């Protein structure tokens, strides 16, 4: 009996060892893979480390704010719960995408060597840029150079110039003229949009009435979709033309306004041009997009 019991226990132990060996081996391999992944993805730096080399390393790194930005960095290290790394030289930024479309003859112009494409903040600043290109919904361009081509382009002052008593009447007149023209253009733009909407309504109504039936057929369904698509396409084309005209009219008004302000500024010995901004371009841009 004891001999039989000993044999049974031995058999159970052998079976357990055989059954558990693959599981233990798999767990060990999984741990090795995780350790290898951690060692290749980031280097861990202890927050409390006071090592001089570590401090020098961290001072040259930039904090990665979101996981989406990881692809923009190299030499990534972890400190606490944060990641740091060296930012890659951008090769697909908006400015470079704009620059990549610039003809070679323009790139070779010496005046462009010290300049970079900048995002144009407002439509009324278009006159300050050249080689303007559209990327998405934004406009980019090269800031025009003033004077010698080797000089740095003048940056617009963030502080509005003071309007003196001798300039006030001229400036107020320029503002009123500009705003009256803008309101006229806005009324014309609104009317054109409303007319385009009315045309779309008529087109869609006719398309549905022409294809509606008590029993739909594949041909009727196809015809209705096709005619409704034509209505939509016609509206989009009209809206695009209206937006382009509105932007061109707005630019014309603002160009005239800036010229008037230059005249007002010349009534004194000041060197800087007057500027009284109204934010209207930003509002118009938001409505038209």
Image: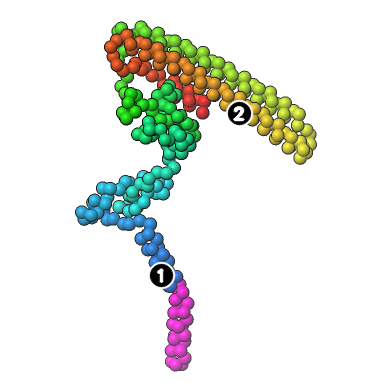
Residue 98, image x, y percentages: 45, 36
| Helix, strand or loop at mark 2 | helix
Assess whether residue 77 is covered by the magenta stretch.
no
Residue 108, quarter of picture: top left
Q: Main secondary structure of the magenta part?
A: helix
Is residue 50 rendered to the left or right of residue 181? left
At a point 44% along the width and 17% down the height, the residue shown is: 255
Is residue 240 rendered to the left or right of residue 210? left
The numbered mark, 1 or 2, whose residue comes first in the sequence reads: 1
In the image, which disc is placed on residue 269? none
Per the image, the residue denoted by label 2 is 236
Is residue 84 rendered to the left or right of residue 6? left
Residue 116, image x, y percentages: 38, 34
In the image, which disc is placed on residue 28? 1
Q: Against 20, is 76 above or below?
A: above
Residue 263, quarter of picture: top left
> Which segment did they paint magenta?
1-23
How dense is the environment of label 1, judged by Cα within 10 Å: few (below 14), some, or many (20 and up)? few
Residue 238, quarter of picture: top right
């Amino acid at each position: 009996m004891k001999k039989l019991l000993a044999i049974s226990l031995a058999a159970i132990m052998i079976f357990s060892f055989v059954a558990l060996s693959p599981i233990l081996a798999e767990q060990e391999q999984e741990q090795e893979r995780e350790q290898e992944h951690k060692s290749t993805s980031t280097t861990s730096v202890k927050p409390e480390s006071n090592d001089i080399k570590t401090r020098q390393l961290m001072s040259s790194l930039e904090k990665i704010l979101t996981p989406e930005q990881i692809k923009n960095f190299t030499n990534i290290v972890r400190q606490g719960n944060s990641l740091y790394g060296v930012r890659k030289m951008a090769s697909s930024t908006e400015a470079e995408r704009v620059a990549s479309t610039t003809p070679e003859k323009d790139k070779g112009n010496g005046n462009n060597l010290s300049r970079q494409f900048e995002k144009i903040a407002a439509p009324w600043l278009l006159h300050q840029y050249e080689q303007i290109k559209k990327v998405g919904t934004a406009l980019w361009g090269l800031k025009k150079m003033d004077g010698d081509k080797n000089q740095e382009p003048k940056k617009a002052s963030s502080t509005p110039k003071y309007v003196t008593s001798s300039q006030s009447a001229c400036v107020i007149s320029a503002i009123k003229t500009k705003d009256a023209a803008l309101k006229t253009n806005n009324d014309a733009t609104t009317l054109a949009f409303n007319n385009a909407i009315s045309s779309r309504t008529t087109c869609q109504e006719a398309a549905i009435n022409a294809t509606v039936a008590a029993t739909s057929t594949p041909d009727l369904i196809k015809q209705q979709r096709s005619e409704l698509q034509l209505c939509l396409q016609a509206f989009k084309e009209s809206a695009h033309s209206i937006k382009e005209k509105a932007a061109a009219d707005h630019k014309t008004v603002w160009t005239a306004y800036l010229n008037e302000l230059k005249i007002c500024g010349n009534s004194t010995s000041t060197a800087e041009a007057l500027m009284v901004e109204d934010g209207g371009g930003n509002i118009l841009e938001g409505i038209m997009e």
